[in-house]
Image (spheres, grey):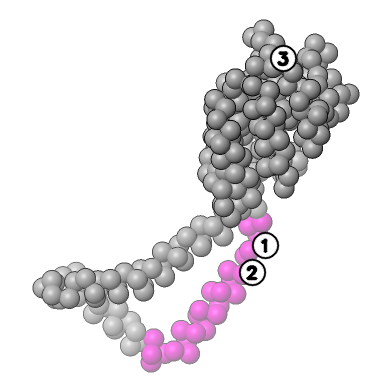
Amino acid sequence: MILVTGATGNVGAAVVAELTAKGVPVRAFVRDETRARERLGASVELARGDFEDTASIARALDGVDAVFLSSADHPQKVAHETAVIDAARAAGIQQIVKASTIGAEAGSPLPPFDWHGRIEGNLRASAIPSVVLHSYYYMTNLLASAEPVRQTGKLFAPLGFAYISAIMASLVVALTLTPALCYLLLPHAGLETADPPLIRIIKRGYTRLLRRIERHYKTTLGIVFLLVALGLGMLPLFKSQFIPNLHEGHYILHM
């Protein structure tokens, strides 16, 4: 018999369905039996309880050999799953399979990663034979964007500022750290200081251009302001056309 916690969630419900399809005896640990029946079906054995009710956890573990440990991301996640681990150790459970995530580490600045990392530490300390599943990204996470996609046909993601930040960080390093390290580490390297012929040609042309700009700086500033104004004026014409329409079809993953 396998006890599945978080059985009405996306992951837990899929685990219950898969175990049931393979004929494995399964018991679902749930708070709302009515919702659980609607989600899991009438044939699944239910154990009504709550993570904060240790007696209900102990009752759910009666006659169980293994536990699939999962719960919603919540500030009480560590306490909830640790309560199951402690009860499983007391009940002599033979194995725990924990749903975790890549990047799980106690002390992580990202709360879910910290929670998973602390729970994994408690699981190791329990000495119960265990398997930890480090998932990367659930396709069901995309459901949070279902309504915007339905309305606009586009999938929005906040990547623009991340890309700009990465480029700006690289620029700062290139202009500060890299020259300083070169100065400190290569002081007597005998580097060639003469520019290659192509660079000398480019520099001469660039120097002439700068001199013209100095002589006609008012005209240059006028052209710059005109181009900026033209660019700003054209922004409303683009709207969301930078984001392509989604016509890629559907992907169904079965694992």
Mark 3 or 2, nearer chain start: 3
Count how many numbered circles sit on residues in the image: 3
Residue 23 versus residue 200 in the image, above or below: above
Q: Is residue 26 among the parts visible in the rendering?
A: no
How far across and how far down the image is residue 206, in percent?
Answer: 30, 78
From the viewer's perspective, tell me whether residue 200 is left or right of residue 226.
left
Q: Is residue 54 shown in magenta?
A: no
Task: Give the Cα distance between marks 2 and 1.
Answer: 7 Å
- Which region shows up in magenta? 213-239
Q: Label 1 near label 2: C-beta < 8 Å?
A: yes
The kind of residue tagged 1 is Pro
Instruction: Pick out the residue farthest to the right.
Output: 34
Element class at badge 2: helix
Expressed as whole percent of the image width and height from the top left, the position of residue 18 reads: 66, 16
**Main secondary-structure element of the magenta-colored stretch:** helix
| Quarter of the C terminus within the rendering | top right
Q: Which residue is mark 1?
A: 236
Rendered-image quadrant of the N terminus: top right
Give me the residue at 59% from left, 39% from top: 122
